[in-house]
Image (tube, rainbow, N blue to C red):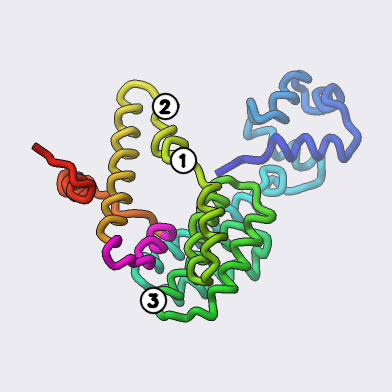
Amino acid sequence: MEIRIGENLRKLRIKNELTQERLAEVFGVSPQAISRWENNSAYPDVTMLPIIANYYNISIDELIGMNEIRNVTKMNSIFSIVHEYESKGMIEEAIQTLRDAIKVYPGNYGFLSELAIALTLKINIDMEYELVNEAIALSERVLLNCTNEKIRSTTKANLCFLYLKANENKKAINLAKTLPHVWECREMLLPEMLCGNDYITEFKKGIATVISVISEKIQNSKSRDLSRNDKIMAIGPRTSSDDLKGKIELIMQFLDVSST
């Protein structure tokens, strides 16, 4: 949950053509305190909130940015509901939930990307290929306007499969070439930001995830079951470490590598 009080205080001060020095006099604090509030390095004491809100003739909720916080919380809950539906194979319910959410948040690229993925799942399960163009259009809209790299990467990966379904193989190949290399992915880089036991723990998680993805792709390779790949895009791979040895053996067999 992100408290936006600093940003709101700065906007209110500028809107009312006030200086930090003037506000410091009004609230009985130092100009440095006002500066720290505005850059979010410190927050006003809770007893100051009613005073500040009354001064600007706004509610405390508005000062803190509660509407935005509630929106973020609500949107996160929608993503959780969608992922639960998808994990249970309730794709129609996931699609309807996302369509309803987009009516309320039409510019939310996360919802648009998720809808494209949900439509992709429905295409594979129910063979409703008339949905391919809609899913492609949604994905291309996200890539045209969205600046969130995580959303863009997920959208690109799913769009590669959508292009294949639309017999746009060259587009699929060219788009796949723009995706990060494996050594640039989160699972490989995040551990490097940590130290000690945290490094080891995160690195093990990354290894388990990569092994799980590879083993699932091997299992799907004979039938070329793209629907499983699409499901990975939607809810992620099965990353249980219970049978890592079996997964590693499967990979070695696939590569014709002897374990002896």
Q: Is residue 32 above or below residue 213?
A: above
**Residue 199 occupies quadrant:** top left
Check disc 3 and report the residue beneath it. 125
Q: Is residue 70 above or below residue 132?
A: above
Say few, some or many: other residues with alpha carbon within 10 Å of mark 3 (under 14 / 14 to 19 / 20 or more).
Answer: few
Mark 1 → mark 2, Cα distance in angstroms: 16 Å
Check disc 2 and report the residue beneath it. 192
Residue type highlighted by circle 1: His
Residue type highlighted by circle 3: Ile
Residue reaching furthest left?
Answer: 260
Q: Nearer the viewer, mark 1 or mark 3?
A: 1
Direction from residue 223 to residue 248 in the image, left or right? left
Local secondary structure at mark 3: helix
Which one is in front, 226 or 147? 226
Are dots 1 and 2 in contact, CB under 8 Å?
no
Which one is in front, 99 or 52? 99
Residue 244 can be seen in this image: no
Tell me, yes or no, whether the highlighted magenta stretch contains residue 56. Answer: no
Residue type highlighted by circle 2: Glu
Check disc 1 and report the residue beneath it. 181
**Residue 211 occupies quadrant:** top left
State the image coordinates of residue 18 (x, y, percent, origin top left): 88, 31
Q: Quadrant of the C terminus?
A: top left
Mark 3 → mark 2, Cα distance in angstroms: 39 Å
Tell me, yes or no, whether the highlighted magenta stretch contains residue 231. Answer: yes
Direction from residue 25 to residue 71 in the image, left or right? left
Direction from residue 163 to residue 66 in the image, left or right? right
Q: Main secondary structure of the magenta part?
A: helix
